[in-house]
Image (cartoon, coloured by chain):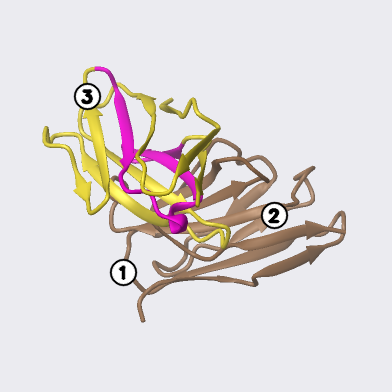
Chain colours: A yellow, B brown
Amino acid sequence: AQTVTQSQPEMSVQEAETVTLSCTYDTSENNYYLFWYKQPPSRQMILVIRQEAYKQQNATENRFSVNFQKAAKSFSLKISDSQLGDTAMYFCAFNDYKLSFGAGTTVTVRA
Amino acid sequence: DGGITQSPKYLFRKEGQNVTLSCEQNLNHDAMYWYRQDPGQGLRLIYYSQIVNDFQKGDIAEGYSVSREKKESFPLTVTSAQKNPTAFYLCASSAALNTEAFFGQGTRLTVV
């Protein structure tokens, strides 16, 4: 069974600074997708960024970027120029025909 | 508007009762999922379905049941066998099993 591990339960960052969230996963599959989701206090799940395993280039979406290391099974998320609205719980997710989530990292952006 | 609709938003159940949570999508997605989220924790997969009339158990299926009679609908029944059903339940769908999922707004179930 695949597992997704987020080792940082909580992270705090000053507004305009950068924060990096870690995620590792375990799979025997070669073709899969990885995602980062954001869950603000409203509890609505919002897709932040996605990465296809067959693509070597790291995905970027505005202030959000990933560092995908396939051999190491690592998929970290970098939030640049942090904004107050980035305060939320962030989940790493892995999909190889069964979408599994990590335990989440609570990110607090301080003014 | 296309999307996923979960109902009701809040649900109260007496102990020993079965309750059914609704999940409907008009995105023409093949795959649908049910997750449970406890306070401050991640999402745990209950059941998922790739196509109509087919579904698989997730990591915590005991005490739950589902059906997939229509592509748009994937209702979840929380049975009396589920010993601790109070939680936030999220339904999701995706175009295929290995693409990103889109989520409903969730149902908060409380046992009273």
**Residue A109 can be seen in this image:** yes
Q: Is residue B89 magenta?
A: no
Q: Which mark is residue B28?
A: 1
Q: Farthest residue in the top direction?
A: A72
At numbered mark 3, what does the secondary structure look like: helix, strand or loop? Answer: loop
Task: Return the x and y of residue A63 as percentages of the image width and height.
Answer: 27, 50
- Tell me: residue A80, above or below residue B102: above
In the picture, residue A47 is in which quadrant? bottom left
Question: What chain does badge 2 belong to?
Answer: B
At numbered mark 1, what does the secondary structure look like: helix, strand or loop? Answer: loop
- Tell me: residue B19, above or below residue B48: below
For the N terminus of chain B, the image quarter is: bottom left
Q: Which residue is mark 3?
A: A70
Task: Return the x and y of residue B64 as percentages of the image width and height.
Answer: 65, 49
Compute the Cα span from label 2 to label 1: 26 Å
Residue drawn at x 24%, y 32% as measured from the top left = A67
Q: Is residue A80 left or right of residue A104?
A: left
Q: Which residues are magenta?
A: A72-101
* Callouts 2 and 1 close, C-beta under 8 Å: no
Q: Residues within 10 Å of mark 2 (few under 14, many from 20)?
A: many
* Callouts 3 and 1 close, C-beta under 8 Å: no
Chain-order first, disc 2 or disc 1:
1
Residue drawn at x 30%, y 31% as measured from the top left = A75
Residue drawn at x 36%, y 48% as measured from the top left = A16
Q: Which residue is mark 2?
A: B78
